[in-house]
């Protein structure tokens, strides 16, 4: 039996229905608001601005992104170079792999690697009293140690400790390594990002880090997609205040 509304109700359609139009208008709105209300955007390079815009598009959080995002020098350009060289993207959770564009991965030969659901990860985590993400990244680094790699974390901060410690203990060539550190939460999160930043600065490893408690796997996806897009769009110019 069909219910009748208790108050007047009319069916509606979305004001903007075409996907491409929605995307264009969204980024136009983001740029206008950044220009009008967030002058701090002008201190970032064109590459960094492209990532920031995509992160805001993903989260709608202007202040949280601008206040917490950290780029090592030329991080976007160096990560872009690794992607173009077919770098493996080693992940802490499969959620990131599901979100990544298959077009970009296939175009640049980037395999998204996540061993977190492999039986050995369960066994190792239980045996050593750690997380599956910790065990998974240790194995992934060992397996791909001679290839360019981007270590991307959106959820499990133990991944960061395992990644850094394994890179050093295995003697991996750090000139072929980059970090994307975006775990979110309340335990180990702030500390793990601080550890990642110290490592990046000590060994000149290109890194993008969302400091503090803010973060999440969708932000890793957004960052990678923004960097992929700069391969085609990069023009060396910033968008804001001509700086």
Image (cartoon, rainbow, N blue to C red):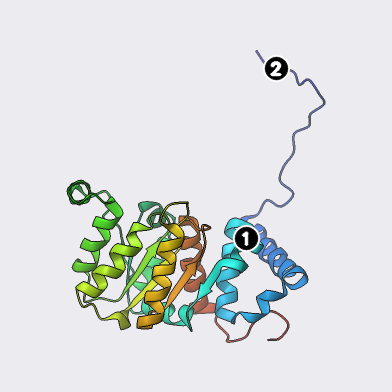
Q: Is residue 167 left or right of residue 208?
A: left
| Upstream in sequence: badge 1 or badge 2 | 2
Q: Is residue 116 left or right of residue 242?
A: left
Residue drawn where x is 37% and y is 78% of the image: 82
Q: Quadrant of residue 101?
A: bottom left
Measure the alpha-carbon separation of dots 1 and 2. 36 Å
Asked if 229 appears above or below 65 in the picture, the reply is below
Q: Residue 176 in the image: state x and y as whole percent.
A: 31, 80
Q: Quadrant of residue 189?
A: bottom left
Judged by depth in the image, the label closer to the viewer, 1 or 2, is 2
> Which label belongs to residue 54?
none
Asked whether disc 1 touches disc 2, contact meaning CB atoms under 8 Å apart, the reply is no
Q: In the rendered image, which residue does mark 2 sit on?
A: 3
Q: Nearer the viewer, residue 9 or 223?
A: 223
Asked if 151 appears above or below 79 in the picture, the reply is above
Q: Is residue 61 left or right of residue 39?
A: left
Q: Residue 108 in the image: state x and y as whole percent.
A: 37, 73
Residue drawn where x is 58% and y is 73% of the image: 50
Q: In the rendered image, which residue does mark 1 sit on?
A: 20
Give the crowd class for mark 1: few <14, some 14-19, many >=20 residues within 10 Å.
Answer: few
Q: Which element carries disc 1, helix, strand or loop?
A: helix
């Amino acid at each position: 039996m069909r219910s009748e509304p208790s108050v007047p109700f009319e069916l509606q359609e979305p004001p903007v229905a075409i996907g491409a139009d929605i995307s264009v208008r969204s980024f136009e709105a983001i740029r206008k608001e950044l220009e009008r209300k967030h002058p701090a955007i002008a201190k970032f390079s064109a590459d960094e601005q492209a990532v920031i815009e995509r992160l805001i598009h993903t989260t709608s959080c202007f202040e949280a992104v601008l206040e917490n995002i950290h780029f090592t020098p030329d991080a976007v350009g160096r990560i872009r170079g690794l992607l173009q060289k077919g770098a493996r993207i080693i992940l802490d959770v499969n959620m990131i792999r599901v979100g990544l564009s298959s077009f970009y991965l296939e175009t640049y030969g980037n395999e998204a690697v996540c061993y977190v659901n492999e039986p050995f990860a369960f066994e190792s985590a239980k045996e050593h009293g750690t997380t599956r993400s910790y065990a998974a990244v240790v194995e992934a680094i060992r397996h791909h140690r001679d290839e360019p790699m981007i270590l991307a974390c959106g959820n499990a901060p133990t991944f960061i400790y395992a990644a850094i410690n394994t890179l050093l203990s295995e003697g991996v060539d750090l000139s072929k390594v980059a970090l994307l550190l975006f775990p979110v939460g309340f335990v180990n999160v702030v500390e793990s990002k601080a550890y990642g930043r110290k490592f990046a600065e000590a060994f000149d490893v290109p890194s993008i880090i969302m400091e503090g408690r803010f973060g999440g796997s969708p932000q890793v996806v957004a960052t990678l997609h923004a960097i992929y897009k700069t391969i085609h769009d990069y023009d060396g110019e910033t968008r804001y205040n001509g700086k």
